[in-house]
Image: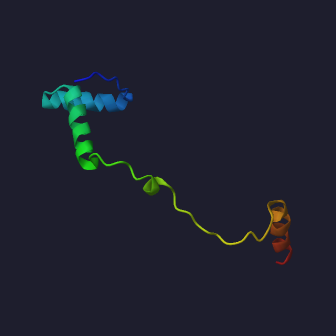
Amino acid sequence: MQKMQILFPDPQIARLRRIATSQDRPVSELVRSAVDFWLSRYGDQEPDSSAKSPPVYSCGDILVQADMLRENAYEDRDLV
């Protein structure tokens, strides 16, 4: 077994300590159980990098250049 330091936010460590006390178990055992659960769910799979990338959308051609946006917006007001 190897030692590792992990920092938890105060609310999270307080909850862990309450659960550990109620179950009469050390916090380290709870953390190891949580890691075991997570590892059993994800196994030894390599993360699929393509699944992590955001979707790509095509929004069509650029109809108005950025420096003309303000003028075009005010043109629409004049039509009303």
- Please provide percent x and percent y for residue 31: 25, 32
Image: 67 above or below 75: above
Q: Residue at x 52, y 61 (%)?
A: 55
Res 36 quadrant in image:
top left
Q: Give the color scheme: rainbow, by chain, secondary structure or one colour.
A: rainbow
Residue occupying image coordinates x 26% and y 47%: 43
- Left/right of residue 30 with respect to residue 8 in the rendered view: left
Horizontal placement of 5 versus 50: left or right? left
The N terminus: image quadrant: top left
Q: Is residue 37 above or below residue 59?
A: above
Compared with residue 78, is residue 27 higher up or lower down, i.e. above or below? Answer: above
Q: Position of residue 61 (x, y in %)?
A: 71, 71
Return the residue nearer the eye: 40 or 15. 40
Q: Residue furthest left?
A: 24
Residue at position x 61%, y 69% in the image: 58
Residue 13 rendering spot, x and y as whole percentages = 31, 28
Q: Quadrant of the C terminus?
A: bottom right
48 above or below 11? below
Q: Residue at x 20, y 36 (%)?
A: 33
Total number of numbered labels?
A: 0
* 42 left or right of 51 in image: left
Residue 38 sits in quarter = top left
